[in-house]
């Protein structure tokens, strides 16, 4: 079986024991992350950008990229004409790569799951790819993401199918819907986000779209 340079990095980030281990791994991976993920057919940015294009009509609306990484989603959104991209990530190494693209107006080192220093209703949409997955962003982060999204705005996320059930995402979705804070708009079929990865090709995900109420 062919081995890819992504294999060791993916094994590392999915099994990191502490937050500082995870940050350290992403800091180290930042340099080759884009090429490594392209080599294994990483499809999340295309899926989420397509959904963003379906729901975010105004190209100057503020779009908040949660776990921006190197800016793979922003890269596509900017090509599509979206001009007000902001984002957070906890890895300075990844943020430096995103910053170098010169497409984000505001990038901050913040931890999803902690308080976000963005005002209530200050963004029109949240996008997030590859972050709500094993050992990464927690379901509790959705409370803050919902708070900063304006009424009528959209939250467009990928969520791993295992963590959806086992790490509280289904429960969080039900809680926020029952409080009438969000309503589900659409969920994609299950798909493989890294189809050419020898180690992670069986990993599965869905993308979820909610409207802020
Ligand atoms: C697989 S990468 C995805 C990056 C980008 N969204 C993409 O699709 O290419 C996961 C990113 O989430 C960040 N991350 C993981 N957990 C986080 C958390 N709790 N708060 C902020 N960033 C987090 C990592 O630093 C990393 O940049």
Image (cartoon, rainbow, N blue to C red):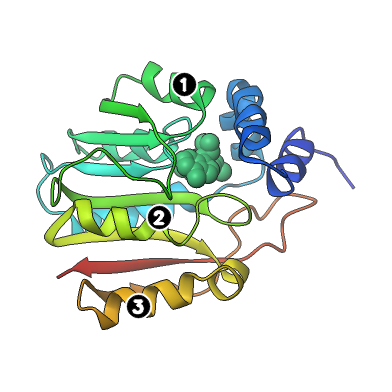
Q: Earlier in the sequence, mark 3 or mark 1?
A: 1
- Percent across and percent down for residue 209 are 32, 67
- Percent across and percent down for residue 157 are 39, 58
| Residue 90, placed above or below residue 212 | above
Tag of residue 97: 1
- Percent across and percent down for residue 103 are 28, 25
Residue situated furthest bottom in the rendering: 178
| Residue 67, placed above or below residue 201 | above
Tag of residue 141: 2
Report if the beta carbon of the residue with label 3 is closer than 8 angstroms to ligand 1. no
Image quadrant assignment for residue 150: bottom left
Evaluate if marks 3 and 1 touch, with contact meaning CB atoms under 8 Å apart: no
Q: Earlier in the sequence, mark 1 or mark 2?
A: 1
Q: Earlier in the sequence, mark 2 or mark 3?
A: 2
- Disc 1, SS: helix
Number of numbered labels in the structure image: 3
Q: For mark 1, does the 10 Å Cα neighbourhood hold few (<14), some (14 to 19), or many (20 or more) residues?
A: some
Residue mark closest to the camera, 1 vs 2: 2
- Disc 2, SS: helix
Report if the beta carbon of the residue with label 2 is closer than 8 angstroms to ligand 1. yes
Q: Is residue 139 visible?
A: yes
Q: For mark 3, does the 10 Å Cα neighbourhood hold few (<14), some (14 to 19), or many (20 or more) residues?
A: few
- Quarter of the image containing the C terminus? bottom left
Q: For mark 2, does the 10 Å Cα neighbourhood hold few (<14), some (14 to 19), or many (20 or more) residues?
A: some
Which residue lies at the image location 28% right of the left edge and 59% below the top edge? 155
Q: Is residue 177 left or right of residue 164?
A: left
Tag of residue 175: 3
Image quadrant assignment for residue 31: top right
Q: Is residue 79 visible?
A: no
């Amino acid at each position: 079986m062919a081995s890819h340079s992504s294999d060791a990095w993916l094994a590392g980030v999915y099994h990191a024991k502490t937050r500082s281990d995870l940050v350290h791994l992403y800091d180290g991976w930042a340099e080759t992350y884009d090429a490594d993920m392209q080599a294994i057919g990483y499809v999340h940015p295309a899926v989420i950008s397509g959904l963003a294009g379906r729901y975010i009509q105004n190209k100057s609306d503020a779009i908040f990229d949660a776990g921006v990484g190197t800016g793979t989603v922003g890269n596509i959104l900017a090509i599509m004409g979206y001009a007000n991209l902001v984002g957070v990530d906890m890895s300075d190494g990844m943020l430096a790569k995103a910053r170098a693209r010169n497409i984000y107006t505001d990038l901050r080192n913040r931890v999803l799951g902690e308080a976000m220093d963005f005002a209530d209703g200050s963004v029109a949409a949240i996008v997030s790819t590859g972050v709500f997955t094993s050992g990464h962003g927690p379901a509790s982060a959705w409370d803050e993401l919902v708070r900063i999204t304006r009424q009528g705005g959209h939250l467009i996320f990928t969520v791993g199918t295992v963590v959806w059930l086992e790490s509280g995402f289904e429960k969080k979705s039900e809680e926020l819907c029952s409080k009438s804070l969000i309503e589900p708009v659409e969920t994609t079929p299950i798909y493989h986000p890294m189809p050419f990865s020898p180690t992670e090709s069986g990993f599965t995900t869905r993308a979820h779209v909610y409207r802020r109420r």
